Amino acid sequence: MDRTVQLAQARFVIEEIMFRYAERLDAGDLEGLSALFARGSIKPAVGEPVKGAEEVLKLYSTVVKFYDADENPVPYQRGQCTPRTRHLTTNLIFDFDNAVKAATVRSVFTVYQTLAGRNEIVAGGRYVDRFVRTLQGWHLDERQIIIDNAGDMSRHLND
């Protein structure tokens, strides 16, 4: 297959994985989010790296604050709560190896949160992601989260 076609296909699949991460987090679907890391790891902005779906699920259900439909803080329960956020991922820059079997993707994220009728930017930063293509397709091998612009995250993250 022509390398240009391989690059275009890879970008499409990788972008979908990246955007699904944001969608699942905002929807309060940590099981879906953590499945993206079944063969990967996360290096959070604070704390130790975690690897695999189970550890990622535990990390996010502990660190992220969730709210019910009436905006009351509640423990995480799939389908019953959300963090009331919108994660926007932009400025994707792709660096592929020659064989198009691995890629590093740098991107920028902005996190909005809406509570009590206020829509505020609570964080901004960068993701540095490593993707790998195996016989099963592309997967997220590692995500590093770097917070460059910390706003008031007191209603988004637990201490």
Image (cartoon, rainbow, N blue to C red):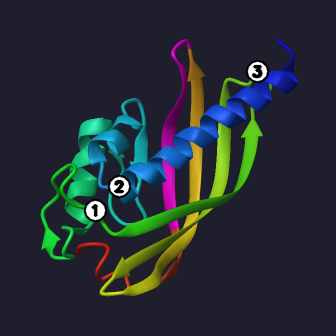
Mark-to-mark CA distance, 2 and 3: 35 Å
In the foreground, 103 or 12: 12
Q: Are marks 1 and 2 in contact (CB under 8 Å)?
A: yes
Residue at which label 1 appears: 82
Among the two numbered marks 1 and 3 on one chain, the one whose residue lies closer to the N terminus: 1
Q: Quadrant of residue 85?
A: bottom left
Residue 142: x percent and y percent? 49, 42
Query: In front: mark 1 or mark 3?
Result: 1
The quadrant of the picture occupied by the C terminus is bottom left
Q: Residue at x 18, y 75 (%)?
A: 70
- Looking at the rendered structure, the kind of residue marked 3 is Ala
- Looking at the rendered structure, the kind of residue marked 1 is Thr
Q: Residues within 10 Å of mark 2 (few under 14, many from 20)?
A: many
Q: Is residue 126 left or right of residue 3?
A: left
SS for callout 1: loop
Residue at which label 2 appears: 27
Q: Residue at x 29, y 55 (%)?
A: 28
What span is colored magenta in the figure?
135-146
In the foreground, 6 or 112: 112
Residue 37: x percent and y percent? 39, 37
